[in-house]
Amino acid sequence: METSDIIPSRPFDDLSAEDWLARVADRNLIDGDLTPGPATLDVMEPAQMRRLAGTPASGEDEVAAAVGAARAALPHWATTNARQRGRLLAKAAREITACSEAIARLLARETGKALATECRGELAVAADLLEFYGGLAPELKGETVPFDPSVFATTTREPLGVVAAIVPWNVPLVLTMLKIAPALVAGNTVVVKASEEAPFATLACAVILNRFLPAGVVNVIVGEGPSCGTALTAHPDVAKITFTGSEAAGRKVYGEGAKRIVPVSLELGGKSPMIVCGDAELDRAVAGAIAGMRFTRQGQSCTAASRIYVHASLYDAFVSDLCGRLETLRIGDPLDEATDVGTIINTRQKATIERYVKLAEASPGARILRLGTLPEPGPVAPDLFMQPTLILDLPADNPAACEEIFGPVCVISKWDDYEEVLAAANASPYGLAATVWTDSLSTALDATRRLNAGYVQVNQNLTIQPNLSYGGFGVSGLGKEATLEAMLENFTRKKTIVFAM
Ligand code: NAD
């Protein structure tokens, strides 16, 4: 493979979004080099409905090169002092922060997410995750085990080897860092399979990491799931697969892991319930619904609170207040500072979302409320913008009410029986997140104990936090992300060592 551009050792903070794009377009990042791929896939700028740039359609050869580089870098990285590994990640975090405005603009262009409400925050969380895990390096500890006095028994934590990290397009930087920061601190080397829909901000951050880490420790390849993703999960030198994406692809990835008996963690979809009780504070619950549904991310979130159950006594006020606030969200150019809501990622995803809305419309008595104003053609192409949409009076078995839509569409139902609403909330194969809104401590305690979800919150709707364990039950996934526990469980293996004295 031809090597195009050795990564320089000077800071990048003078680069604009366009400079970054020129650097990472049509490139993989393998063994410290930005290397052209074999053929080009088009990455669109959804708010303009035009090609932003090309990205490689990597296949087996690129996977082999990236895994080979990661494997070659492993012995040195795995034996580097853990605190030193952590310090290098913290340095990269500081430089990502220094470059964050340009990379956030690039992220806004490739994903269609608004710069002001989404992309700047995503850069901040990505840097925070590197810093957080950098500081956890000294916690890679083993144990001493009480045993017979003639024996000294201990455990150690070892890196697994080459980690394959496969990520989607909706929050690509945060989801990448959630995987690679703990993997790297634990002494593994990584190959990231970036999303072919939005690879550039991820490549830019990886270029920054490569300024501080030895070549081959972090590699990023781009390509389509069935070809590039499958080649990566099937590669015999990959020791661990960590995947975030759809349930369908997750099942295939799990199958590949099973063939070679390598550990697999999966963060998949969701249809998360939000239960608003009659004694909830209305204002707070409505604000929580907007935050929880991730309306400023066009609802393209696995944890989106897309099933809202409101007690009959609050229902009318809740719906009316929510409609009023959604009307004020400004939908438009992702790069405009005044924009709250950008675009759906692509035409296929928008068609999927609209298909669910049509299925709801076909249900007798269902009401569909589309809120806010779509932008006029001109500064943007209007095709992929979509209004926040509420669906009322929909039976629970309608596909829009029970399947993941991954768009700005939320189903709101009225309830008056606590046992029934808990049963409805739990009647889903997913179990990613849930919230309950109440003034009563005993209701909150009871509901949090009984809700079948991995991340349950009361009177708030926080996103992923580095020090709160995150991961789904049921078909929402396997294993946890964030926290020290995730680093130890996902990215190390425990060895027992017993000495006879
Ligand atoms: P997707 O499954 O189509 O793709 C995700 C990634 O997997 C991409 O990089 C893709 O190229 C790759 N891929 C696809 N098929 C593959 C295969 N057979 N083998 C290996 N890799 C493969 O998902 P998407 O459309 O990019 O993202 C949306 C989905 O991601 C939604 O279902 C959403 O719920 C889920 N998601 C989950 C979380 C979470 O933390 N639980 C977070 C964000 C998104």
Image (cartoon, rainbow, N blue to C red):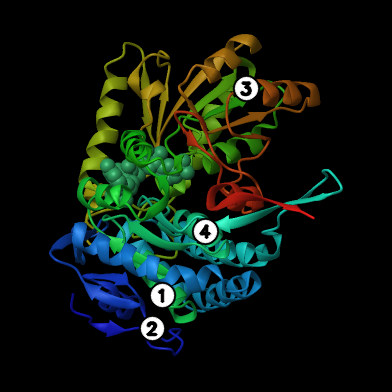
- Residue kind at label 2, given as amino acid type: Leu
The residue under label 4 is 183
The C terminus - image quarter: bottom right
Q: Can residue 363 be spotted in the picture?
A: yes
- Name which of mark 3 and mark 2 comes first in the sequence: 2
- Name which of mark 4 and mark 2 comes first in the sequence: 2
Report x, y in % for residue 359.
Answer: 27, 21
Label 4 neighbour load within 10 Å: few <14, some 14-19, many 20+: many
The span from disc 3 to disc 2 (Cα, nearest Å) is 51 Å
Q: Which tag is nearer the camera, tag 3 or tag 2?
A: 2
- Name which of mark 4 and mark 1 comes first in the sequence: 1
- Residue kind at label 3, given as amino acid type: Leu
Residue 314: which numbered mark, if any?
Answer: 3
Helix, strand, or loop for circle 3? Answer: helix
The span from disc 2 to disc 1 (Cα, nearest Å) is 7 Å
Left or right, 183 with reference to 53: right
Q: Residue at x 36, y 33 (%)?
A: 405
Residue 102: which numbered mark, if any?
Answer: 1
Report x, y in % for residue 416.
Answer: 62, 11
- Residue kind at label 4, given as amino acid type: Ala
- Please identify the quarter of the rendering in which residue 68 is found: bottom left
Judge whether 8 appears above or below 66 on screen.
below
